[in-house]
Image (spheres, rainbow, N blue to C red):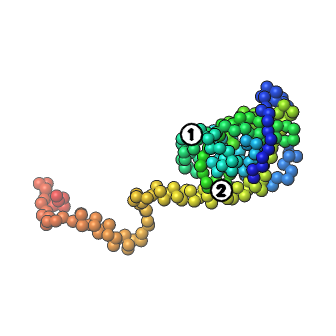
Amino acid sequence: MYARREVYSIADSKALSSEIISFSKKELEGIKLPHHDPLVIAPIIANFMVERMLIDTGSSTDIFYLSTFDKLRLPRSLIKPLHTPLTGFTGHTIHSVGEVTLDFTVEKGTKVSTIRVQFTVVDLEDSYYNGLIGHLILTVLHAIVSPIHRKMKFPTPGGIGEISGDQKNARVCYQTLVPLLNRQKEDQSRKQSKGNHIVVNTVRGKEEEDNSPKEKESEKKRKPHEEVEEVPFKDGKADKTF
């Protein structure tokens, strides 16, 4: 979903609330537990509300997909060329299209925080997400994420703001993503094996082993091509031959 919003102010970190950010058991109400669902939120990017943005606290890069960028009808001239290899959890390495700097806003009511974010733009059609929020955005926002609460909280000049993830939407994203990841892994395996010989170890029965071509060939190599004459050693032990 891309709903245009009007966002003007950039939050000043010096004016942020000094309130303590905390999470309570009461905030777990309405959440299906236990869960391992990803946290997916809908921030405002370039004055548009963009859904299905995945929060990945382990990512060092903030990702924006090219298809999402085009849907916002922003000119591609905003993207500065930058070809950087990126390796994700699928093990695949892709190259970025470029970088683009956009306004990024999270809000709840009057509690708003807006920052300027330099996104790495990636052309990846198979992803169900519209982008990825890494720890750089979270650090600048001074945000705290609680996966179990499916919530992110952040200080603003007007107090502590928060943004919650949609658990149902997160599960749909995950269920859609898993088959895509499996297909990517299969494609990668086929590419790696193409043009290479694959050795497969098999277990054979005794009779099959005795009559196997490999065993017969080995026996041929061990048989002498000429007759062997036994010659006794000087010590008289005729059981030793050469």
Which residue is tagged 1?
A: 81
Q: Which residue is painted at 78% across and 52% down in the image?
A: 166
Quarter of the image where one finds residue 47? top right
- Near-viewer residue (219 or 119): 119
Residue lying at 79% horizontally and 44% vertically, measured from the top left: 5
Q: How many marks?
A: 2
- The answer, for residue 28, to whether it is visible in the render is yes
Q: Is residue 240 left or right of residue 100?
A: left
Mark linked to residue 124 = none
Q: Is residue 42 left or right of residue 82?
A: right
* Amino acid bearing label 2: Leu
| Residue 48 in picture, x, y percent from top left | 75, 45
Question: Which secondary structure, mark 2?
Answer: helix
Q: Which residue is mark 2?
A: 177
Which of the pair 111/217 is nearer the observer? 111
Q: Give the residue type at disc 1.
A: Pro
- Quadrant location, the C terminus: bottom left
- Residue 92: image x %, image y %? 55, 49
Q: Nearer the viewer, mark 1 or mark 2?
A: 1
Pointer 1 with pointer 2, Cβ within 8 A = no
